[in-house]
Image (spheres, rainbow, N blue to C red):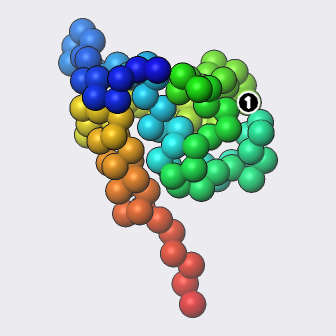
Amino acid sequence: MIPAMQKTELVVGGVMACRIGCGACCIAPSIHSPMPNMPAGKKAGERCLNLTADNLCKLFGKPERPAFCEAFQADVSVCGETQEEAIRLIGWLENATECVPSG
């Protein structure tokens, strides 16, 4: 597994590359669409069942990968400098944008 404190690496043009083995985007946010192994999606903070022990997505590049996952782009504003920071930031965004039923 990638060390938890591994720092973010930037690629040409200042665009952040995904930290291989981070998996924060597969743990912190909720995913409301069905996917293999999780027909009801997943709750925020729940580890996706399609995430390997090495924190790699088993669905990456496959048509059954949820659109939410496909659209996610690594960015220092949401991924921070470490996996722990990414989980905290994405979790904060999840809470800040949570839909609360009226009534």
Q: Residue at x 72, y 25 (%)?
A: 63
Q: Residue at x 67, y 25 (%)?
A: 59
- Up/down of 93 relative to 36, above or below: below
Q: Which one is in front, 35 or 27?
A: 27
Residue 91 x/y as whole percent: 40, 53
Quarter occupied by the C terminus: bottom right
Count of residue discs: 1
Q: Which one is in front, 55 or 60?
A: 55
- Up/down of 18 relative to 26, above or below: above
Q: Residue at x 77, y 39 (%)?
A: 37
Q: In the orientation shown, which residue stands out farthest toward the top?
A: 12
Question: Around disc 1, counting alpha carbons within 10 Å, would you say few (fewer than 14), some (14 to 19), or many (20 or more)?
Answer: few
Residue 30 appears anywhere in the view: no
Q: In the orientation shown, which residue stands out farthest toward the bottom?
A: 103
Q: In the orientation shown, which residue stands out farthest toward the left?
A: 14
Residue 50 appears anywhere in the view: yes
Residue type, mark 1 in image: Glu
- Name the quadrant containing residue 102: bottom right
Residue 7 x/y as whole percent: 24, 24
- Name the quadrant containing residue 5: top left
Residue 78 x/y as whole percent: 32, 41
- Up/down of 77 relative to 100, above or below: above
Q: Residue at x 34, y 19 (%)?
A: 17
Q: Is residue 63 left or right of residue 73?
A: right
Q: Is residue 59 left or right of residue 77?
A: right
Q: Is residue 12 left or right of residue 43?
A: left
- Up/down of 20 relative to 88, above or below: above
Residue 25 x/y as whole percent: 47, 38
Secondary structure state at the residue bearing disc 1: loop
Residue labelled with disc 1: 64
